[in-house]
Image: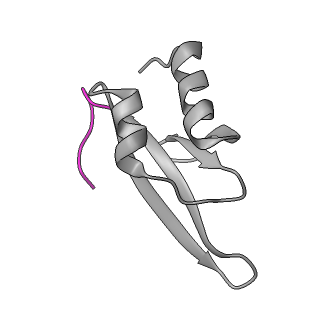
Amino acid sequence: MRLSIETLKQIETKFGEFDVSQTIGSNNDIYLRFGYWEAIDVQKLQDILGTNIIVEEDNDYDDDCGNRYIYHLFDSMFYKNK
């Protein structure tokens, strides 16, 4: 899976500041976090990334912050719907 700097700039232009991180553990998923765990339009992100990368929204409720959203990225060649 590859993301060009141009694609990352398009994402930033559309949604604002974001972080790219990787889950440490069994699957080492790559994910995006927007602002302070903000929700974004998944379909608009998917449209920017195209068909080679699959986006899955995940959220976790925190008593202090409320819902915290992250967006996992998967290579479509190896994607298995969980």
What colour-coding does the image apply? one colour
- Quarter occupied by residue 79: top left
Q: Residue furthest front?
A: 14
Residue 23, above or below 59:
above
Please report the residue visible at 49 percent of the width from the left and 41 percent of the height from the top.
29
Q: In the rendered image of this protein, does residue 35 appear above or below residue 12? A: below
Could you tell me residue 49's position as x and y percent?
39, 28
Residue at coordinates 58% horizontally, 42% vertically from top-left? 15
Instruction: Where is residue 60? Give x, y as percent.
Output: 55, 71
Query: Looking at this view, is 46 or 75 the one in front?
Result: 46
**Residue 13 within the segment the image draws in magenta:** no
Residue 8: x and y, percent? 57, 24
Given residues 58 and 11, the one toward you in this image is 11
Helix, strand or loop for the magenta stretch, by majority: loop
User: Can residue 77 be seen from the camera position used here?
Assistant: yes
Q: Which segment is the magenta one?
A: 75-82
